[in-house]
Image (spheres, rainbow, N blue to C red):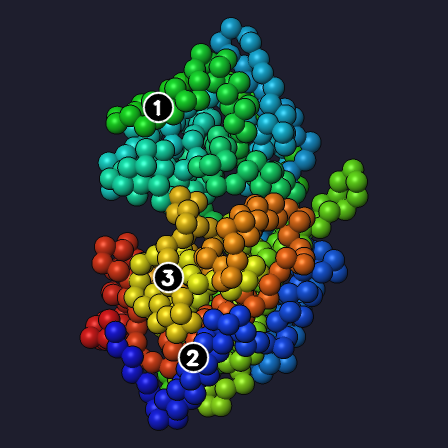
Amino acid sequence: MPDKIITSRVLFLFSVFTLLFVVSCNRGQNHDIPHFSDHYRRFVETLSSDVFEGRAPTTPGGRKTKAFIEAEFRRMGLKPANNGSFRQAVPLIEITGSSFTDLLVLDSIGRTISLLYGTDMIVGSTLQQDTVSLDFSELVFAGYGIVAPEYNWDDYAGLDVKGKTVLVLVNDPGFELNDPALFTGRAMTYYGRWTYKFEEAARQGAAGVLIVHETEPASYGWDVVKNSWTGPQYYVGGKNNEPKVTVQGWIQKDAADSLFALAGYTLNELRQKALTSGFSAISLGMEVSVSFRNKWKYAQSYNIAGYVEGSVYPDEFVIYMAHWDHLGKVETAEGVEIYHGAIDNATGTAAIMAIAEKFAAMDPPPARSVLFIALTAEESGLIGSQYYALNPLFPLEKTAGGVNIDGMNVYGPTWDVSVVGFGASTLQNILQKHAEVQDRKLVPERFPEHGNFYRSDHFNLVKGGVPMIYANSGNEFIGRTERYRLMVEEDQKNRYHTPNDVINNLWDWQGIDQNLWLFFNVGLELANTDYWPQWSEGSEFRTIRETSDFLRGRKEEL
């Protein structure tokens, strides 16, 4: 791997940092990892406090969040990234549904079942109209709802769904059969994501689409669906001519069982049919109806972006990114519940802020420019990063690579580093180098079937050809028992997208310090070389990278 240091001053600076970090890692083996930042804990405590009200975009808490990050970037001495401003406006449409009726399912002989909103089903709409409804829409089981020519798979083959509602399974067939020759086996593809299933149903002309929720293939429980899909929902504003369904949503598994029983099937029976080569969609002999009201408004949120200008290649960039938003607060019968989002993602936002402060203090600056961007509306569908990828402040083809931080390890130092999208690009070589300096090993993520590679903001830059690292600590905690690891898993499950995601006395901040040093050094090395990471052979993103105008004359560097 090329690793060319640009100038003697940069070489000296990089050597000093590497030496310091070798010392720090040796100390880390004795559970004495050097403190990374005097401000990091303050950042996390502030962002996850009651005052910030869960950091939902367009709310008072969201506005406080943006102002806080911007003020800190200015204090650090970062350069504003958007023509003199730290803010990149992201146009949003905020849609809030209300007055939901039951989802009424009527069969051909007049038998009905009613599915209750929140308990049995969740529905919504991206349409900007006062009343949204499905009125006796024919219900069709469309398997996994996938059209994937490269896998010779088409659940919509020969099917006309115009005006109909499709009922589809979550994830993809490879997960269920655990067959590496089918899709990617247990590892989820983009075809398994709920976002894809909604998009494909719309392309097919369906009026409605409902995903059957099952905890294992979805990788999260029904409460996550309910918490994420109720209340205001945000979508990218501006011109958008992509097709849309009228109603989209989820059905809880037990409710789906009742629905299928009325049609004379079981869920397992239909799943087996959907896994059969040449599957044909099945009309269930039912019609569905539901209605609700939509209130919408055009809003604007902001990505907050600042950078350190490079001393040798100022027009080339390394990027650190993290989303600042979370789920806000909700009114309940017991009072207001705040979704503080301490781990998700106050820890990640604080991480890019702490790393930015360290880069900003460097004299001389690194060879390449380093961009730090706190993104909005990730929880609503990666909207802030989607908008940035479509409207980059600096060209994606001049972005050498970067690090996405979505939740830090708060449970203590580990011997391993879990990589989402393991082996995707040669940028992982730099990560491995610095993990080894810490006497740590890289491991693939434990549950690739969860589809995490498609569930965080880095994916929008990946689609633009930019290699990105998305990693966190694994589960080999230094000096801890198996019982401790199981406790960590339980704590993670109980806090994800719930009001329980707060700072507590379980947190071991040295685990955060360990990863802050790791991510800092990965970016530091990439910023101080003229190396251009490339995608691995066979990656669908490799061609985008290699055929860019900027890199065409630098093929020898790839």
Type of amino acid under label 2: Val
Quarter holding residue 428: bottom left
Asked if the residue under mark 2 is in contact with the one under mark 1, i.e. CB atoms within 8 Å, the reply is no
Q: Nearest the camera: 41 or 256?
A: 41
Sequence order check, earlier mark of 1 and 2: 2
Kindly identify which residue carries mark 1: 272
Q: Residue at x 66, y 49 (%)?
A: 500
Side (left or right) of 190 relative to 91: left
- From the image, which quarter does the C terminus lie in? bottom left
Q: Residue at x 50, y 69 (%)?
A: 514
Q: Residue at x 30, y 43 (%)?
A: 184
Is disc 1 placed on a helix, strand or loop?
A: helix
Is disc 3 placed on a helix, strand or loop?
A: strand
Q: Residue at x 52, y 27 (%)?
A: 253
Spatial separation of the CA atoms under disc 1 and disc 2: 54 Å
Among all residues in the image, which is located at the extreme bottom? 8
Q: Which mark is residue 22?
A: 2
Type of amino acid under label 3: Leu
Spatial separation of the CA atoms under disc 3 and disc 2: 18 Å
Type of amino acid under label 1: Gln
Residue 347 visible in this rendered orientation of the protein: yes
Is disc 2 placed on a helix, strand or loop?
A: helix
Kindly identify which residue carries mark 3: 442
Q: Nearest the camera: 558 or 346?
A: 346
- From the image, which quarter does the N terminus lie in? bottom left
Counting from the top left corner in percent of width and height, residue 374 is at 55, 65
User: Eyeballing the image, is 148 above or below 160?
Assistant: below
